[in-house]
Image (cartoon, helix red, strand yellow):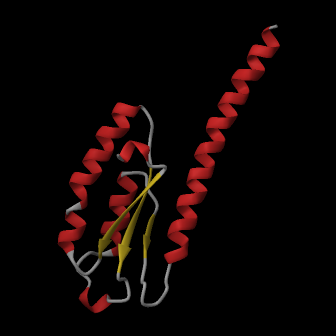
Amino acid sequence: MLQEQDALIFCYDVTDADTFYALSPMFQKLMELEYSLGEKKICILVGCKSDLAENRQVDYSDGERTAESFEAPYLETSSKDNKNIEEVFEIALIQVFKKEKKKRDKVFEKKVAVVEKK
């Protein structure tokens, strides 16, 4: 099922460390999938409930470091404050469009190479 997705958004609750640690097996599956497909999937890591700073169990730097290790953007969001909600989806769409453009460019280059050989 993951192989059919254009982008994956992994979310955890910054006030619940267990949700952050639960991402580890998911990232492991993602790495295995990328290896078997031979392509990198687009993923974004999102820390939710950033407005609840007094209850925070996962530091921003931990989320950022984890995202970097998977070459993924990292954002913290707050539904309550309407912070970074749209940005998560904008980043996902931009990355999908860039990836699709690269695929189209490769196909175009192959077609041009075939025409030039004739």
In the image: residue 81, left or right of residue 56: right
Residue at 26% of width from left, 83% of height from top? Answer: 56
Residue 101 locus on image (x, y percent):
66, 43
Residue at 39% of width from left, 42% of height from top? Answer: 3
Residue at 53% of width from left, 66% of height from top? Answer: 89
Residue 27 locus on image (x, y percent):
29, 51
Residue 83 locus on image (x, y percent):
49, 83
In the image: residue 71, left or right of residue 29: right
> What is the quadrant of residue 46 in the picture?
bottom left
> What is the quadrant of residue 47 in the picture?
bottom left
Residue at 25% of width from left, 60% of height from top? Answer: 23
Residue at the limit of the structure toward the left, as seen here: 18
Q: Is residue 17 above or below residue 101?
A: below
Q: Quadrant of the C terminus?
A: top right
Q: Is residue 102 above or below residue 6?
A: above
Count of labels shown? 0
Q: Is residue 51 above or below residue 73?
A: below
Q: Is residue 21 above or below residue 86?
A: above
Residue 18 locus on image (x, y percent):
17, 70
